[in-house]
Image (cartoon, rainbow, N blue to C red):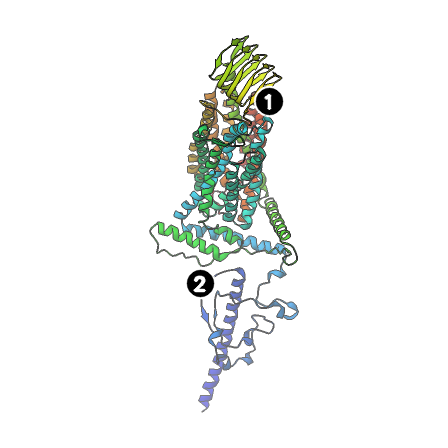
Amino acid sequence: MEETYKDRTSLMKGAKDIAKEVKRQAVKKVNKAVGRAQDGYTQRSYNRFQDEEDDDDYYVQGGNYGVEANDDEGSSEATEGHDEDDEIYEGEYQGIPNMGQGKDGMVALGQPMRDEYKDRHELETERKADEEELAQQYELIIQECGHGRFQWALFFVLGMALMADGVEVFVVGFVLPSAETDMCIPNSGSGWLGDIVYLGMMVGAFFWGGLADKVGRRQSLLICMSVNGFFAFLSSFVQGYGFFLFCRLFSGFGIGGAVPTVFSYFSEVLAREKRGEHLSWLCMFWMIGGIYASAMAWAIIPHYGWSFSMGSAYQFHSWRVFVIVCALPCVSSVVALTFMPESPRFLLEVGKHDEAWMILKQIHDTNMRARGQPEKVFTVNRIKTPKQIDELIEIESDTGTWYRRCFVRIRTELYGIWLTFMRCFNYPVKDNTIKLTAVWFTLSFGYYGLSVWFPDVIKHLQSDEYASRVKHFRNEEVSHFVFNFTLENQIHSNGEYINDRFIMMKFKSVTFEDSLFKNCVFEDITSLNTYFRNCTFINTTFYNTDLEQYKFVDSELINCTFFHIRTGCQISFDDDYSAYWIYFVNFLGTLAVLPGNIVSALLMDRIGRLTMLGGSMVLSGISCFFLWFGTSESMMIGMLCLYNGLTISAWNSLDVITVELYPTDRRATGFGFLNALCKAAAVLGNLIFGSLVGITKAIPILLASTVLVCGGLVGLRLPDTRTQVLM
């Protein structure tokens, strides 16, 4: 009997020891589960464990964890009456205990401090640590997903958007001569068309880049490309010059977001060893856009038979068909983007773990199926997400009107974009932003300035040659003669035309000075750059002509009659090969960047971004001195091709460096700001270099060489990003 009592005592003591040990392990696991729930982790492996005591034994009143029970309170009752509902799984979110239940609001023992009790500096420090951990983990995940069908599909979709940006830059230059004539644009207003597009692109790059860091790369790109496509299509139908400028302004505003968003988007689905090469291949689509625009202009604009009119008020000429055709890449990119997912790196940055995980799994499965390995499983179970710092904003949803709520929302988004932009000048990216600003400005100023200067110099040489072949006719006396042929590049002075008939004629660059027209008839006349200066018309009839009042400069019309005068500017360039020549020159200049694109793509990850950037800019600056020898059209075209071929490597490496130097939460904003600066430098370069055409060669050559070499030297001071993960 005594032995039975001893055995029972030993059994109870052993049960007490076991219960104490189980309690300690349970508290540890509960704390671990709560901590993981707060950090946003997800866990697939579930380990079951059972409670050996009641909740009151290991949850002290007030919700405090980790307080050990008294030895005297342990008994075998802790193992009785256990319910299946008490099971807890590791990694399962159990909820955070109510902090208000603790005495005087004290934090529970063993529980991390809640975000409400931390200042902003502590939260930002934790977020920075989370971002660094995410950057390393994300690189490993992308490597596991592989490079394959998904990246190539996204490559072509984003390439169409980048192609649309290249088209937009060239459209203005090709359309401007025809639009000036069609809309009767004076010389003082013709420069506005080029500047207004760059102004829209400048504002759009900053706005859409900032918005891409707020709402996502895909959504921002979809909206901006839709805006571009709509206003580009609308601009082909408008008749007034003011409305045409308005449409091209918003078209440029839309396309301005393409470059910063496209490069940010694509870089976030590429592994480190693939990033430099494939971003360089992506740059080729900008060149393809230029070639497409040149080819379409060459094929469409000179064919004036494609036009139609509805009376004299509505004219739809071939250049408007060209504008519609140039909108096709934009429309194609919008349609294709609807089938592509959001950047998973952006989703992780804003705390959307599940959506990011599903997209990464989609990338993995797509690539594995294309490789013939559909059975390969995506092994990633959890991904680190940075701590989210909430910004609470009151929008007056109850009392405010709908337009006030919209105004507050827009103001809030703009303020958020501005705050993100200001963070580009905070440590540790401040120095990089300043250096990148210098490189982007100098490269844009030199490249766009000379790009405008080259065609203008070629046109100036052509004008000089054309003017040298002008024919002079003096003191003519012609009577009772019928003119029914084309007059071109002629000057008639002190002539007398009596009882003559000018029927179904075309005047091109013809000037009559100090001449007399008496009893003459002008019928079915089309004119271009034709003027009558200080002439006298007596008893003369004008029927179905485009000879408006402004073409009679200081002339006297006595007893003259006008019937069916065609108002507006008439386009008629039959057998005019100057337009073909302009398009052909731009086609060659754009095609010349193909070798530079191929070289930069193959060598980007081998010789490094900085070497390519600095070397390309310095060589481009040196090549400017060869312009001294450009005395003919063919030599200037050769110099243009050489210059474009050298600078394209600098552009490609600068795009790669920019996306790699900025962290994800401000990558598109920083890129958008630099791209906006690029457009501002382009406008400044156009104004300065354009004013020097026909005056001197020394200043453009020295100015372009200086800024390019200085920018290249600054670029060499940037940090090398070839071996870095995408932060």
Within-10-Å neighbours for mark 1: few <14, some 14–19, many 20+: few
Q: Secondary structure at mark 1?
A: helix
Above or below, 451 relative to 414 = above
Relative image position of residue 329 (x, y in whole percent): 45, 40
- How many discs appear? 2
Label drawn at residue 550: 1
Label drawn at residue 44: 2
Q: Secondary structure at mark 2?
A: loop
**In this rendering, would 297 be left or right of 388?**
left
Quarter of the picture containing the N terminus is bottom left
Q: Which label lies toward us, 1 or 2?
A: 1
Q: Nearer the viewer, residue 677 or 162?
A: 162
Relative image position of residue 121 (x, y in whole percent): 62, 54
Contact, CB < 8 Å: mark 1 with mark 2? no
**In this rendering, would 73 be left or right of 336?**
right
* Real-space Cα separation, disc 1 to disc 2, in angstroms: 82 Å
Q: Nearer the viewer, residue 279 or 501?
A: 501
Relative image position of residue 529 (x, y in whole percent): 54, 21
Question: N-terminal of the two: label 1 or label 2?
Answer: 2
What's the residue type where badge 1 is placed?
Tyr
Label drawn at residue 312: none
Q: Nearer the viewer, residue 381 or 398?
A: 398
Kindly identify the residue that appears in the image at 64 percent across and 67 percent down: 105
Residue 144 visible here = no
What's the residue type where badge 2 is placed?
Arg
Point out the residue furthest to the left here.
372
